[in-house]
Amino acid sequence: MSDDEKFMKMALDLSLKGLSRVNPNPLVGAVIVKDGEVISSGYHKRYGDLHAERDAFKNLGEEVSAEGATMYVTLEPCCHYGKTPPCTEAIIENKIKKVVIGTLDPNPLVSGKGAEILRDSGIEVVTGVLEKECKEINEVFIHYIKSKRPFVLMKYAMTLDGKIATFPGKSKWITGEESRRDVHFDRARLMAIMVGINTVIKDDPMLNVRLDREYLDNCGLSDARQPIRIICDSNLRIGLESKVVKTAKEQRTIIVTKGLKNKNKIRKINKLAEMGVEFIFDDSDGDIINLELLMDKLGEMKIDSVLLEGGSALHWSALESGIVTKVKSYIAPKIFGGKDALSPVSGRGVEFPDNAFEIIDQKIRFFGEDILVEGILRYKNKLIHGGE
């Protein structure tokens, strides 16, 4: 490993400390090196706070100067005014001699401009150091900034014969504790979790993050943000006594329902609103939620990522609508059998094998006895992923 890769790896590790807190901004870490020694470092801690570069400058000791130093940063320094001033200005003001960048800004309107400004100011710029790793940590941001829609991760747990429940509908627990802990980590790192109303009626879930202190410490997280709960409920069948409704004032909860049709529905909407529930109204034609329009609305609300936890009917609708970016399938070494037992995806399905949704860039991991298969979704040679 070269020195550039060594210091970029430090910046990468730092960036991950912002998990669960920076969305819809990217995870970014920065390290300042002078005469072969790290003199300061920083990372983007939460949305609205200092960017990694400015955090690193803030952390410089009182008697320490960054003049002539090299800065390692996982993402191209910004060159525009947002919640904070451009980081390129801070780099120039602190007389940094060289900037090593992991990956350029994925926004096609901005990409390369920050590096160009630095070069025009006489600063040496190197790009593409640990580029793959720097892109991987920001797959959500890359997708969101390019597509203006949330990154949608479809997750399910199933048996070796492809069942998500026994024939009477029993599903707790298919996978082991380690797999379930990984799911809760995704709930923490992604902004929202989405389910259908049948899941709420059948299971009455909390849809929250439940991770112990030791696990959070091992992940480098001081806390875990609770996800925004999104319930697809066309006919507003949700019960007032459901856990997600009763806790809506503590954990943001949005119900997506079809347009107003009758006085009873209006009364129920008003009651749910009093209990803290928010609404997105779908006025499109048809009786089911238009998931493409929903993703547009969520993107406008700066919700950059959604963990889709089905069930099977919503999974098919999501696939058919073309909104799924990535799939994570946890497979337990068990067999349920049963012709009436549910599979992870229902609906009509594809007609021919050649029409299958494909999973590419697969990764296989083990959680206890369970196997996780994950990858990017491709359909008819088209990537749903907004990144690369």
Image: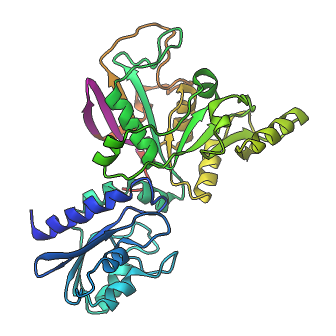
Coordinates of residue 197 in the picture (x, y in percent): 64, 29
Q: Is residue 189 above or below residue 84?
A: above
Query: What's the residue at 52%, 75% (across, down)?
Result: 83
Magenta segment, which residues? 363-381
Q: Is residue 96 above or below residue 176?
A: below
On the rendered image, what quadrant is the N terminus found in? bottom left
Query: What's the residue at 40%, 72% (across, down)?
Result: 51
Residue 376 shows up from this direction? yes
Coordinates of residue 204 in the picture (x, y in percent): 60, 26
Number of numbered discs overlaid on the protein picture: 0
Query: What's the residue at 40%, 56% (across, down)?
Result: 387
Coordinates of residue 274 in the picture (x, y in percent): 78, 44
Residue nearer the viewer, 384 or 267 = 267
On the rendered image, what quadrant is the C terminus found in? bottom left
Residue 103 shows up from this direction? no
Q: Is residue 66 left or right of residue 147?
A: left
Residue nearer the viewer, 123 or 362 = 123
Coordinates of residue 287 in the picture (x, y in percent): 73, 33
Query: What's the residue at 48%, 64% (across, down)?
Result: 47
Give residue 139's quadrant in the image: bottom left
- Magenta stretch secondary structure, dominant: strand
Give residue 135's quadrant in the image: bottom left
